[in-house]
Image (cartoon, grey):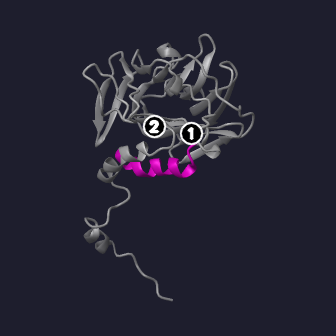
Amino acid sequence: MTTQKRNAEMVELLRPDFQARYEPNFAWVNAVSAFLLLPGLRGFWPMSSISNAGNAYDLSGQGRTLTYTGNPLYNVVGLAPYIDLDGAGDYLTRADEADLDITGAATVLATDLRGLTMGGWFWIDSLAPGADDAFIGKWNTVGDQRSYLLNFTDASNSVSFSVSSLGTAVTVVTVTSAAITAAAWHFMVGRFDPSTEINVWVDNVEVVNAVGTPASIYSGTANLNIGAHSNGATGLLDGRASLCFLCAAFLPDAHIKQLWEQTRALYGV
């Protein structure tokens, strides 16, 4: 049997003609288009398009601008844009509206696509004891206005995705098997499949909870926040956020895996 050896020199010679999969500049030119093709997209905030006042523009075409709060700074790491939040009053917010009240029952979508998926690339500066760092969500503990939330709880060194069917009771799935490290980029995604399961992804690790999943998510009055929850009252993130998205759909595994693979080179992961 003849075995073909990999010719590393030939690979390098042909690199200008055949695009490498793991390459920051290739990820840079494909990242926005990948997110814009997500089914049921309700908002996409890469943190690149911003106003003079610091508001983060939504590139989905639906105009869901997030209001700048505090004094966070926009920056880049390599080619990737991000917002840097200091954990002391910095966050992005948008008031409640009908298209953010994602219950998982959008009848305009095929049955298999009904649900919710959200996430992005996030960085936590330090794992402070007892910290509650919110990534993205529509969640207010005041007045029982809980809907959906993706956050990090340092007490268990874990990333959690939570949904509520009544604004009070919470169904949560937590990733404890993935290594969460400070001062490092992680791809975080929460996903809801009505009456079936909720799951959370950290990088390429998925954890599923198929017990007690509600049929729908509560349509509450909380603001949509990035970097906080409860309308900025708590869960303030000391870290960074980039390429954040929200979909009124249960994205297939292939979509989430492709987002991870197609963008991770931007963050050196």
- The residue at the far right in this view is 212
Residue 23 at x, y percent in the picture: 33, 54
- Farthest residue to the top: give it: 143
Towards the viewer: 186 or 43? 43
Asked whether residue 120 is drawn in magenta, I would say: no
Q: Position of residue 66 (x, y in %)?
A: 39, 23
Residue type at numbered disc 1: Ala
Does residue 184 appear anywhere in the picture? yes
Residue 258 is a magenta residue: yes
Q: Is residue 130 visible?
A: no
Q: Which is more foreground, mark 2 or mark 1? A: 1
The structure residue drawn at horizontal position 46% and vertical position 40%, both measured from the top left corner, is: 186
- The secondary structure type at the circle numbered 1 is loop
Residue 40: percent from left, percent from top:
51, 39
> Can you tell which mark lies on residue 35?
none
Residue at horizontal 68 percent and vertical 18 percent from the top:
168
Q: CA distance from mark 2 to mark 1?
A: 16 Å
Q: Is residue 114 above or below residue 223?
A: below
Q: Which residue is label 2 attached to?
A: 120
Quarter of the rendering containing residue 110: top right
What range is drawn magenta here?
249-266
Q: Which quadrant of the view contains residue 82?
A: top left
Q: Which residue is mark 1?
A: 249
